Image (spheres, rainbow, N blue to C red):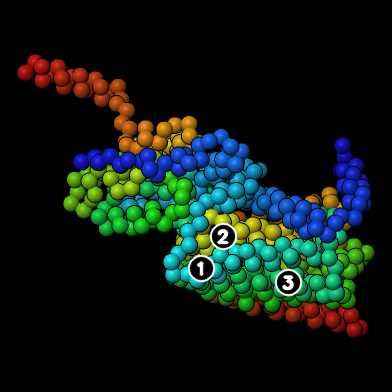
């Protein structure tokens, strides 16, 4: 179900990775002015409300240069919230295509990762945003904390800088929590006992 | 080092040699220097608004990074637009404001070019920039951009007359159309903010209308019409429009400082005065919500135009009597 999308052909670092002065200036400018556009592709609105806290005084992301833009033509980062409904699938793709290169995608929330609570709904694309458009970074949570979103943005900027490999983050990374591990271990024991 | 020494050094640098006209045009005080100054002004504006909203705000080099990023970004040209117009309009608007800057005394330096009637030329060039914005929107064939363009033009007709009248009053007081002469008159007499207070208020608010800042940002209302007239512009074109607007901010502030706040003076006093103006503008920006376009028009024609006409009448009467 989780179809992998090959990202090597759209990697923005492929061309500009040589360390000439021109490329350095270019990269510096890109990293320091990431403008974002927010698209709600069928979220329950929880993630959207949490996203807006990022531009409030407490978490102000303008200090990293992040600005929310109205037009996809003006944005560098597409922030997608929610599982992609069949209705919004085409629009999401269109918005993605309207953005000028280089562009990045940030998936917010469990819904964007896997469909979350809307998984297996009749009206939802199965498997989250990464089955529709290539996603650079996912931020887990339902909804994610603002700190987690800022962390996601910083990881995204690291990718743009070339410090991290894009493909490491192109699929949802699920880090098992300790409780989960122990629960799984208990399950295993039970099944072995049977 | 105190401010007096800096001013003296600045003045001695200016007097060292009469710069070649091309240097005037490309480096100082026009061209490169002006662009950097404009980006600094944009930063100051954004930072002040952020501080008024209790945020941290952008870093100093933020506008520079924004601009460089826009210049190296892909420029998407939609299929349905008139291609050459789409490319040429940002360049024309940028050229207009850069030309207008040559007639305006800035940063304690006299205007490089002084003509009889250069006030009219400057105002005309600034209007052409707004016209370019509107035309770019209308050319974009995007329904949001067209709505934005309509609003841009509507707003242009709303604020333009009062704003022009507000800049006309100092000219009438000084009996000249030459910006340099008016600024000499202004520095020789009491500050015109005291003698023509209504003109000052209208010119500051008119500048905000011209720059489509907060209460008058219906033409680029993000929550309704994407990004207004420039929705379809990306990359270089949009970058040029943004620089043009920043330069327009500097020109507008310089004009108001020169006319109403006692001549262009020296560098330090100019910077202090323009910072004061920026604080006022940022305060107004962050304390008011967006007006609908009909409210904007109503505001300008009901309050702005009538007030400025009254002020003009008072001025003429004082002159005659
Ligand atoms: S992740 Fe949670 S909060 Fe976010 S859209 Fe899905 S259900 Fe709503």
Residue placed under numbered mark 2 in the picture:
B237
**Is B257 on the left or on the right of B89, as rendered?**
right
| N-term mark: 3 or 2 | 3
Residue placed under numbered mark 1 in the picture:
B83
Residue B18 point in image, percent of width and height: 90, 55
The label nearer to you, 1 versus 2, is: 1
Residue B33 in view of the camera? yes
Image mark for residue B123? 3
> At 37% from the left edge and 39% from the top edge, which residue is drawn?
A8
| N-term mark: 1 or 3 | 1
Whole-number angstrom distance, CA of label 1 to CA of label 3: 29 Å
> At 75% from the left edge and 62% from the top edge, which residue is drawn?
B101
In the rendered view, would you say B56 is above or below B190? above
> At 21% from the left edge and 22% from the top edge, which residue is drawn?
A183
Residue A19 point in image, percent of width and height: 56, 34
> Viewer-proximal residue, B244 or A115?
B244
Mark 2 crowdedness (10 Å alpha carbons): few <14, some 14-19, many ≥20: many
Do the residues indicated by labels 1 and 2 lie within the same chain of the protein? yes
Mark 1 crowdedness (10 Å alpha carbons): few <14, some 14-19, many ≥20: few
């Amino acid at each position: 179900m989780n179809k992998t999308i090959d990202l090597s052909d759209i990697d923005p670092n492929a061309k500009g990775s040589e360390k000439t002065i021109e490329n350095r200036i270019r990269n510096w400018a890109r990293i320091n002015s990431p403008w974002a556009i927010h698209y709600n592709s069928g979220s329950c609105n929880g993630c959207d409300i949490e996203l807006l806290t990022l531009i409030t005084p407490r978490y102000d992301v303008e200090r990293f240069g992040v600005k929310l833009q109205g037009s996809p033509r003006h944005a560098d980062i597409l922030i997608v919230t929610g599982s992609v409904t069949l209705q919004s699938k085409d629009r999401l793709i269109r918005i993605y295509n309207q953005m000028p290169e280089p562009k990045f995608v940030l998936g917010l929330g469990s819904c964007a990762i896997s469909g979350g609570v809307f998984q297996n709904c009749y009206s939802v694309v199965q498997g989250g945003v990464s089955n529709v458009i290539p996603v650079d970074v996912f931020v887990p949570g339902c909804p994610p904390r603002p700190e987690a979103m800022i962390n996601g943005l910083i990881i995204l900027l690291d990718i743009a800088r070339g410090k991290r490999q894009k493909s490491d983050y192109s699929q949802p990374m699920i880090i098992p929590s300790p409780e989960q591990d122990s629960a799984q271990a208990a399950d295993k024991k039970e099944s072995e006992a049977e | 080092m105190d401010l007096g020494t800096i001013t003296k050094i600045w003045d001695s640098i200016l007097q060292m040699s009469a710069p070649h006209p091309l240097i005037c045009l490309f480096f100082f005080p026009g061209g490169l220097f002006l662009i950097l100054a404009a980006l600094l002004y944009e930063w100051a504006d954004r930072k002040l608004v952020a501080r008024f909203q209790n945020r941290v705000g952008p870093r100093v080099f933020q506008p520079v990074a924004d601009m460089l990023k826009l210049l190296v970004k892909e420029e998407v040209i939609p299929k349905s637009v008139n291609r050459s117009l789409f490319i040429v309009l940002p360049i024309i608007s940028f050229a207009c404001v850069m030309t207008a800057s040559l007639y305006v005394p800035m940063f304690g330096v006299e205007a490089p070019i002084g003509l009889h009637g250069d006030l009219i030329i400057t105002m005309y060039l600034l209007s052409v920039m707004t016209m370019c914005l509107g035309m770019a929107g209308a050319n974009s064939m995007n329904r949001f951009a067209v709505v934005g363009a309509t609003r841009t033009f509507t707003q242009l007709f709303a604020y333009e007359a009062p704003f022009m009248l507000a800049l006309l009053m100092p000219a009438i007081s000084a009996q000249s159309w030459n910006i340099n002469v008016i600024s000499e008159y202004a520095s020789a007499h009491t500050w015109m903010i005291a003698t023509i207070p209504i003109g000052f208020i209208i010119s500051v608010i008119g500048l905000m209308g011209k720059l489509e800042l907060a209460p008058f940002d219906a033409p680029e209302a993000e929550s309704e019409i994407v990004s207004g007239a420039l929705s379809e512009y990306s990359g270089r074109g949009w970058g040029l429009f943004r620089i043009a607007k920043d330069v327009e901010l500097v020109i507008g502030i310089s004009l108001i400082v020169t006319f109403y706040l006692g001549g262009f003076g020296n560098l330090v006093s100019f910077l202090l005065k323009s910072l004061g103006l920026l604080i006022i503008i940022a305060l107004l920006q962050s304390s008011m919500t967006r007006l609908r376009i009909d409210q904007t028009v109503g505001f300008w024609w009901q309050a702005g135009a009538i007030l400025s006409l009254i002020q003009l009448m008072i001025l003429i009467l004082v002159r005659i009597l």
